[in-house]
Image (cartoon, rainbow, N blue to C red):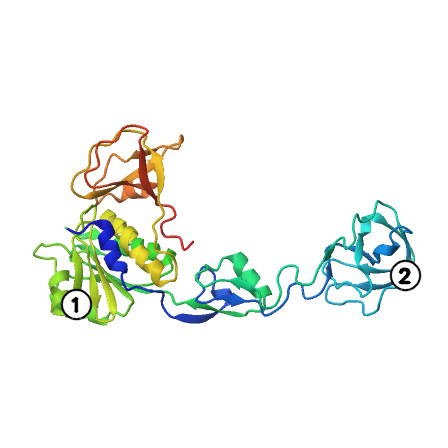
């Protein structure tokens, strides 16, 4: 059996961000930039007032008396030039008139007709309440780099910089297909000896959250010809089979893939849950076979599929971990790396769940973390620090 880190490295070997596509800003949220983006415009494009008030010359502040000669509003500036003793009524965002170099806020001005008088302390410095042209950025300035995720703030910045479309990394196309005569779709009442197929919706949501474009082909019966037809018709960067990857008489994924000419890079990993997982290539697609037990499928997707999806989508494939103290002791671990479901306690410690069976979705849904126990790890005592993978953020594109 292959070690977890060795299997992940083998799976990611040769993978690179997918080609770029152009998207309008409104459709680009959460996507990853495929190349650096520079400003096409200067922001602000002109000196502008940061407050409502009066544009004046700093030299006239001591006298504190002005004659109002015009008005400058946002989108409608004043075209003249301010002279000695003159002021222009100005509003936030409006262009600063020629000749003016300071803004006095309206609360410090008393106005009588066209005459204004300083009634407060006045601005404390030359250039007060003025946003200089290019204060935010100048045309040609680098606004975002290749690999940056497009957050709402970044989208606003790039819009202000003059961009209506952006070059983003294409989303990885992932195809899911579950195998098994025992499965029925969600919302369907199972017959005798049947269960509801929960893996497709669970993994689809997880991978879509990580940036994939997911197509769920549904359930394929345990028939060679049915599985072969489904695989032959699948079109994706990644094809994921769920179930049927073990060694039972009805586990057909491996023999069918071999019949179809697939190359298998590895099969079986020294981990728990999730030992019977395979990875390889089927034509131009990467093929990943996940176990059918839902917790096993989820853990394998977390450790292997998510990093691959992130890498193809232009993001870092690294899995974030944190060290937390144990709320209760743990026994020594055996010959496979364990990923125990656990919950965070109010005191900041982590407690392993009582039930660790790979079919217990209720335990997974109630868990906050996967507690990682390396191969051969000795027994751990209360308050000992352990490595954890947070379940509330593993699929995030951030």
Q: Which residue is mark 1?
A: 262
Task: Tell whether 5 sits left or right of 228.
Answer: right
> Which class describes the residues within 10 Å of circle 1: few (<14), some (14-19), or many (20+)?
some
Residue drawn at (30%, 55%), measured in percent from left and top? Answer: 203
Return the residue at label 2: 84
Residue 369 position (above or below residue 141): above
> Residue 348, image x and y in percent?
39, 33
Q: Is residue 185 visible?
A: no
Relative depth, front residue between 341 and 377: 377
Residue 355 falls left or right of residue 107 = left
Residue at the left extreme, as displayed: 249
Q: Which of the two labelled residues, at mark 1 and mark 2, occupies the earlier sequence position?
A: 2
Helix or strand or loop: what does disc 2 sit on? Answer: loop
Q: How far across and down, in percent of the image, does residue 240 sit?
A: 24, 61
Helix or strand or loop: what does disc 1 sit on? loop
Residue placed most toward the observer, 193 or 138: 138
Residue 194 falls left or right of residue 14: left
């Amino acid at each position: 059996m292959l070690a977890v880190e060795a299997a992940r490295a083998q799976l990611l070997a040769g993978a690179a961000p997918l080609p770029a596509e152009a998207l309008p800003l409104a459709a680009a949220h959460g996507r990853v930039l495929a190349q650096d983006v520079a400003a096409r415009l200067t922001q602000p494009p002109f000196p502008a007032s940061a407050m409502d008030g009066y544009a004046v010359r700093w030299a006239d502040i001591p006298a504190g008396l002005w004659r109002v000669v015009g008005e400058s509003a946002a989108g409608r500036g004043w075209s003249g030039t301010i002279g000695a003793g003159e002021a222009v009524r100005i509003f936030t965002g409006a262009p600063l008139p020629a000749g003016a170099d300071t803004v006095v806020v309206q609360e410090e001005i008393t106005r009588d007709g066209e005459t204004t008088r300083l009634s407060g302390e006045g601005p404390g410095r030359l250039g007060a309440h003025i946003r200089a042209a290019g204060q935010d950025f100048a045309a040609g300035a680098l606004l975002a780099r290749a690999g940056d995720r497009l957050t709402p703030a970044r989208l606003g910045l790039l819009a202000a910089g003059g961009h209506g479309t952006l070059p983003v990394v294409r989303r990885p196309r992932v195809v899911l297909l579950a195998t098994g005569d025992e499965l029925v779709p969600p919302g369907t009442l199972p017959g005798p000896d049947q269960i509801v197929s929960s893996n497709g919706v669970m993994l689809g949501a997880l991978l879509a959250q990580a940036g994939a474009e997911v197509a769920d082909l549904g359930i394929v019966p345990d028939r060679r010809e049915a599985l072969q037809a489904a695989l032959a018709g699948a079109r994706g960067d990644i094809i994921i089979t769920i179930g049927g990857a073990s060694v039972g008489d009805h586990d057909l994924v491996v023999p069918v893939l071999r019949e179809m000419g697939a190359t298998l890079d590895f099969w079986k990993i020294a981990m728990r849950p999730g030992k019977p997982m395979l990875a390889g290539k089927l034509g131009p697609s990467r093929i990943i076979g996940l176990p059918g037990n839902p917790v096993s499928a989820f853990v394998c997707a977390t450790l292997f599929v998510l990093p691959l999806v992130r890498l193809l989508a232009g993001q870092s494939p690294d899995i974030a971990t944190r060290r937390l103290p144990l709320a209760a002791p743990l026994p020594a671990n055996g010959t496979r790396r364990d990923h125990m479901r656990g919950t965070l306690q109010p005191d900041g410690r982590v407690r392993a769940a009582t039930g660790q069976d790979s079919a217990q979705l209720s335990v997974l849904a109630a868990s906050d973390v996967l507690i990682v126990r390396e191969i051969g790890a000795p027994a751990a005592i209360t308050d000992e620090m352990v490595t954890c993978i947070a379940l509330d953020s593993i699929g995030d594109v951030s």
